[in-house]
Structures are given as structure tokens and as C-alpha cells.
Image (spheres, rainbow, N blue to C red):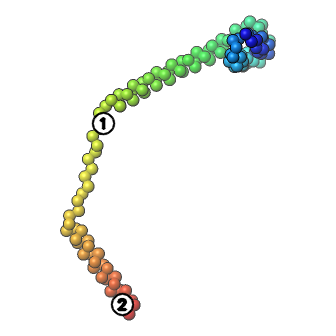
Amino acid sequence: MPDVQITIGGRAFEVACQEGEERFLRAAAALLDNEASVLVSQIGRLPEARMLLMAGLMLADKTAGLEEKLRNAEEVLGQKEAELEELKSRPAPKPDRIEVPVIPGSVTDTLAEIAARAEALADAIEEKAAG
């Protein structure tokens, strides 16, 4: 079982842990050290047991807050998943009917006749301009 040297609140401790768990122990110790350092900077020198207790309680308070946020997020997620499943189970809405107006043949014939007259007028103007 490896021994790991950690520092909490400016004090060194030697702690044993399982093989391969050293990284996790150091990470946990860093969290505790951050809290202990805040205490030491605010209050000054504290007895070791009191410093560790207060730092542990501060971490526990943060953890409880995060757990509450996690529970709320999981609850919202559950509601959204239920809403999504309910929406998926609904029958698909009928597509909107779109009606395209049909232009009567007489209108297209009239437009073609107007276009032909306009072209004839343009040709006549070009001939007069050229001659």
C-alpha cells in the first residue's frame, strides 16, 4: 500500500492508499487544502483537528449544494425526457394543404399576344433608328 505525502493548510501528512489511487487522493487533498488555506488566511493558526474539521465541513457544504443542483437538473431532465417521449408518441400532424392557383389559358394567351406586340414595336423602333 503506497504512502502519499499531502499538504493541507500548510501542514504535511502521510496517508496510505490503495495502489493506483494516489492521483485521486492528491486531488481530494488539494480540495481540502484549498478550504483549509482559506481558513488559515482568515483566522490564522488553528489546531490541526479544528482546521481539518472546518475544512471538511466547508467541502461538505459545497458538496451538498452541488448535489442539490444535480437533483434539480436530473428532475428537469426527467421532465424533458417525458415531454419528448409524449411528443414522439403523438400522431404526426396532417400536412398543410397548399393550393396553387391555376392561371386560365386566356390570360397566358393574352400575355403572349402582348409580348409579341412589344417585340414588334421594339423591332420597328430599331429599324427607324437604324434607317
Residue of label 1: 92
Which quadrant of the structure image shows residue 82? top left
Labels 1 and 2 touching (C-beta < 8 A): no
State the residue lying farthest toward the bottom.
Answer: 131
User: What is the secondary structure assignment of the residue under circle 1?
Assistant: loop
Q: Mark 1 or 2 closer to N-term?
A: 1
**Residue shown at 70%/8% (left/top)?**
53
On residue 35, the disc is none
Whether residue 13 can be seen here: yes
Amino acid type, residue under disc 1 in the picture: Ala
Q: Is residue 26 left or right of residue 91?
A: right
Depth check: 110 or 45 in front?
110
Q: Is residue 113 left or right of residue 84?
A: left
User: What is the secondary structure assignment of the residue under circle 2?
Assistant: helix
Q: Is residue 40 above or below residue 115?
A: above
Q: Where's residue 68, x and y in %?
A: 54, 18
Q: Where's residue 4, x and y in %?
A: 76, 14
Amino acid type, residue under disc 2 in the picture: Lys
Which quadrant of the structure image shows residue 93? top left
Q: Quadrant of the N terminus?
A: top right
Depth check: 28 or 48 in front?
28
Q: Where's residue 116, x and y in %?
A: 28, 78
**Residue shown at 33%/84% (left/top)?**
123
Depth check: 95 or 114 in front?
95
Q: Where's residue 107, x and y in %?
A: 22, 68
Residue of label 2: 128
Whether residue 9 can be seen here: no
**Residue shown at 51%/19% (left/top)?**
71
